[in-house]
Amino acid sequence: MERHEMEIFLTLAEELHFGRTAERLHLSGAMVSQTLKKIERRLGGPLFERTSRRVVLTPLGSQLYDDMRPHYDALQAAVQRATSAARGIEGSLRVGFLGIMSGIRVHQGAALFRERHPDCAVEVVEVQLDEYVHPLRDGTLDMLVTLIPLDEPDITVGPIVLDAPTYLATAATSPLAARASATPEDLAGLAFPAVSERVPSHWLDQYLPPATPSGVPIARTEQVCSTYQEMLALVSAGRCVTIGDNQLVQYYARPDIAYVPLLGVPNLRHALVWRTAAENARMRAYVEAMTDLLRERAQAA
C-alpha cells in the first residue's frame, strides 16, 4: 500500500466521515472514495460499512487500523528524523531570554521546535540586562529574545515576540503611586537605575532616557544594577523609578511598589535576535517554529 493510501485510510478511520477526511487531507471527496475502493479491491473485502447516516469500520478495517497505525507513525517519525538530519537540525540550540514573559514565549517556541525536530535539544537560559548581546558574540548563546530597537550591524533582528504597553515602577509611598497614569515629563528630577558600562548607552537610553522630552535631566543612581530585581530593590527604597512593560503587573506584583501606566511612549518590544554570521539550519528552524507559534496566538486572540 502506498503512503498516500495509508494516510487516507487512517484518516477516514479516525474521522468516520468522507467530507471531513477530504477537508483534513486537502483532497476531493471523490479522491477519498476512489482510493478507498481501490484499497478494498486489493485486499478483497470492505473496510467500512457505509450508510446514508454513518460510516463505521468493519472488523477487517479495525484490524488493519490497529496493525497499520504504529507502523505508519514510525514511518512518519523516521522521515522527520531524516529530514531534520539532512537540514542539519540535530545537536543542540541555546536560546536566552530577558524577562519572564519572554521566557514563557521561548519555552513555547522550544516545545514546538522539539516536536518538529526531536533530534535537536533546546537549552533555555535567562540573561540579565547587563549582558546585552554579549552571549551571542562569545558563543554562550545561539539566539536571544531581548529588547529592540537594537542597532548592531552583526546582529539579525527576527520576529517580534512581545509588544506590550509601558509602565512606570515607583515606590508605593511615592506621590506617583496614587496616579492613574504618568507621562515622561513626570520623570523630571527623578532618577533611573544605573546599569553596567557593558551596556551601550545608545541601547539603554531608549528605555531609560537621560532627560524628559522637554530636556529636564533624569539622573542615574550611584549604585550600578546588574539585574531587574536589583533595580526594583532601589525603587522600593525610594531611590529611583524604572520602566518595564505589563509583565511587571503580571509577574512582579509586590506591596512596596506601584506600577503606573506610562502614557505618550512607545510599547516595549522584545524580538528574537542572533549573530548573523553564526546563522544555521537549527536557528532558522527555531525562527520558523516561533513565527508559527506567534501566528497561531494572533489568530486565536
Image: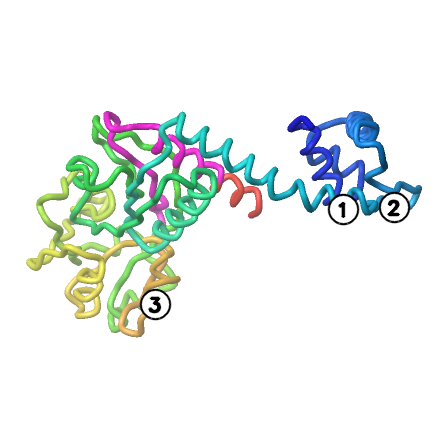
- 138 to the left or right of 287: left
Give how far across and how far down residue 42 sits, in percent: 80, 27
Q: CA distance from mark 3 to mark 1?
A: 55 Å
Is 275 in the magenta? Answer: yes
- 240 to the left or right of 52: left
Tell me the tag on residue 253: 3
User: Circle 1 sits in a helix, a strand or a loop, which is it?
Assistant: helix
Relative depth, front residue between 229 and 182: 229
At x 34% / y 39%, what residue is drawn?
Answer: 271
Task: Identify the mark nearer the N-term, 2 or 1.
Answer: 2
In the image, the segment drawn in magenta is: 263-292
The residue mark sitting in front, 2 or 1, is: 1
- 211 to the left or right of 297: left
- Which residue bears the numbered disc 1? 62
Q: Residues within 10 Å of mark 3 (few under 14, many from 20)?
A: few
Q: Is residue 151 above or below residue 93?
A: above
User: Circle 2 sits in a helix, a strand or a loop, which is it?
Assistant: loop
User: Circle 3 sits in a helix, a strand or a loop, which is it?
Assistant: loop
